[in-house]
Image (tube, helix red, strand yellow):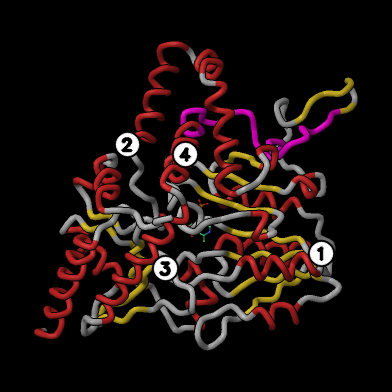
Amino acid sequence: MNNILTNEEIQQIRAETRGTAKTIHFNNAGSSLPPDVVVDTVTDYIYYEALNGGYETEYTYREELDNTYSLIAKLINSRKDEVAIVENASIGWWLAFNGINFKPGDEIITCEMEYVSNLIGLLHAQKTLGVEFKVIPNDENGNFQLDKFEAAIGPKTKLIAVTHVPSSAGGMIPVIEIGKIARKHNILYLLDACQSVGHVPLDVQQIGCDMLAVTGRKYLRAPRGTGFLFVRKEVQDKLKLFFLDGFTTQWVTETDFKSRDDARRFEVYEKSRALTLGLGKAVEYALNIGVDRIWQRVQYLAGLLREKLNAIEGITVHDFGNQLCGIVTFSVEGLAAVDVKNKLAEKHINVSVAKAVSTLIYMNKNHLGDIVRASVHYYNTEEEIEVLCEVLRGLTTHQSVK
Ligand SMILES: Cc1ncc(COP(=O)(O)O)c(C=O)c1O
């Protein structure tokens, strides 16, 4: 099968994405440009609500709303009853993490590229519950060390909590191999797939994770304020619940209640149905293209961008490791990352600043402060990459003239 996205397909996809006509968008790791069908789905739904009433609209759209769970399950190869729709990856991660019944002395293993909010969660658990956590450092080439990871597992290891694709770097960790080790030692495995979903193929059976937290607005191209949490069926009863309402929990008698027997027990009743539908459309859009094909195109474009950046004097690319993703990080000699971002914005080119605090352990270890992050998606083009590099060449020339 030919897996390459053709030029015709790229042009079609761009024609279906209003934003590409206006902006050169390399901030997909922040928030992607959504397909028009996603935007229209959300706005149409809100208009329908305005004309017909919220509950009545929900009834009309009940099958489509429910289908969002099936689409997500298809995307990650899970069961539908293992999916909870939540507002963002942080909520998903916190629901999973804080649901675990930690005891003082329990140990957690994480990676050096773990996301800031998760690290804060680990520190918080250390301070309040007396758990300990170990950080597995990458090797000198930027690769996760599976041998060190397995050696760190002991009788007190309760959880492996790692981030698939970090916020501020182009590297990745081997989530499938980590999963095999987690299974072998029978340890809970929580994966932050916030940056990888919609970008890298995710199969929870293959990965073997028990919990997976995801956001919608990044590579999935869904609206802001959407995300989901996968919790493996066998693990659901082991997690404590934080919010109990009449939707997630049913009265059994006047003195007893029972939680739903699916992952929707982690949700709350009131949420935006319009956004749920938009999330479903975005997932469907990615599935129609094929995540394998998306991943292939993203790797190709990111590789091209790194190659061009490496050829510009005064630019240093900071991505390490054997397996790189769509996030490309670099710095421009003599210019703060925020200034590079602002100069590019003047030309309608969006990049972002990868803040050192977002992935603090990794950034400190590599002596990196804030750096520029250009994250490519499949709808970006070679021409856009050239325009970005041309502007950057101008910035570096300007620096050397000074
Ligand atoms: C790796 C990673 N994990 C988690 C998050 C948090 O995601 P959200 O803002 O959707 O809660 C981010 C946000 O940038 C991230 O990059």
Q: Which numbered disc flags the more N-terminal residue, 3 or 2?
A: 2
Three-letter amino acid code at the position of disc 1: Asn
Q: Dot 3: few (<14), some (14–19), or many (≥20) neighbours within 10 Å?
A: some
Q: Dot 2: few (<14), some (14–19), or many (≥20) neighbours within 10 Å?
A: some
Q: Secondary structure at mark 4?
A: helix
Q: Which numbered disc flags the more N-terminal residue, 3 or 4?
A: 4
| Disc 3 target residue | 355
Q: Secondary structure at mark 2?
A: helix
| Disc 2 target residue | 36
- The quadrant in which residue 348 appears is bottom left
Q: Which residues are magenta?
A: 257-276
* Screen quadrant of the N terminus: bottom left
Relative depth, front residue between 282 and 114: 282
| Disc 4 target residue | 284
Q: Is residue 192 above or below residue 22?
A: below
Three-letter amino acid code at the position of disc 2: Asp
Q: Which numbered disc flags the more N-terminal residue, 2 or 1?
A: 2
